[in-house]
Amino acid sequence: MQRALLLHQTSVGKKAIVAVTGVVMFGFLVGHMAGNLQVFLGPEKINAYAAFLKASLPLLWGTRVLLLVSVAAHIYYSLVLASEAGKARPRAYAKRENNATNLAAISMKLSGPTVAVFILYHLLHLTVGFSPTGAHSETNVYANVVGSFQIPWLAALYIVAQLLLGVHLFHGAWSFFQTLGLSHPRYDAFRRTFAVGLTVLIVGGNISIPAAIASGLFPGGAQVDAAVGEPIQANNLVVE
């Protein structure tokens, strides 16, 4: 028990915490993307989904607390590990060659903080309701999303943020197996395929929403009227 409690003080323990919290965030991102993609099914589906989440307070807040703790621990122990690595090698390499994974790791210094700032903006934008459109509905999620991404610069901001998130996800998915001790040439092909596949799935799914709306081809190739406040019928529940 004492060894388990002291595990977080070791380098291996810190890396394990970063890996496990990363898995939690990966799981959330996949679920979050799957829920958001329901916007392609029309206002009834996405609004009913949002109403279900708001009505399921234990599920909603349990997920939020778990995610918040995971994000905080992930950031904290990532910074601690980076600091320890810097102290262990105070002088830079005389010559350094970078491959794709090393470049992704280096870019974490940029992508990590940028993604963190974007998450805060995303929450303010679509959860709290500080929308550039000047209109926000607590129940008409469809109108909030479509109305916002019809603004070109806002859609572009989300797309760029997702690309930076992709760099972060690729390195996280790649290094996860290394943390588990599976860093071996025998597994490298699978590790790369897994990291690329998972990154493309999440980033591609997230980008498809602002890209489709901003292009005016949403849904079914038709321009969308996103007037906030129009009542929407969702599974016998009227939201307005």
Image (tube, grey):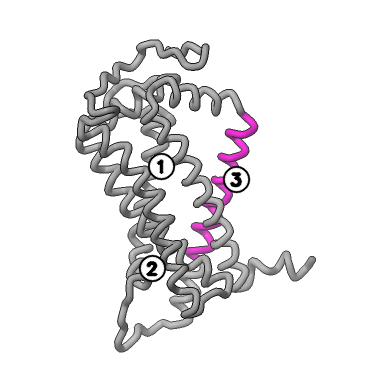
Residue at the image position 56 percent from the left and 56 percent from the top: 21
Q: Tag 1: residue type?
A: Leu
Q: Quadrant of the C terminus?
A: top left
Q: Which mark is residue 66?
A: 3
Q: Tag 3: residue type?
A: Leu
- Give the magenta range: 57-79
Across and down, in percent, residue 191 comes to 46, 68
Q: Which residue is mark 2?
A: 105
Disc 1 secondary structure class: helix
Foreground: disc 2 or disc 1? 2
Residue at the image position 45 percent from the left and 66 percent from the top: 174
Q: Is residue 132 visible?
A: no
Across and down, in percent, residue 146 comes to 31, 27
Q: Which mark is residue 120?
A: 1
Task: Pick whichever, 114 or 224, lies toward us.
Answer: 224
Q: Tag 2: residue type?
A: Ala
Gap in Å between the C-alphas at discs 1 and 3?
A: 17 Å
Gap in Å between the C-alphas at discs 2 and 1?
A: 23 Å
Q: Quadrant of the N terminus?
A: bottom right
Residue situated furthest front in the rendering: 220
Disc 2 secondary structure class: helix
Q: Is residue 135 left or right of residue 50?
A: left
Disc 3 secondary structure class: helix
Q: Residues within 10 Å of mark 1 (few under 14, many from 20)?
A: few
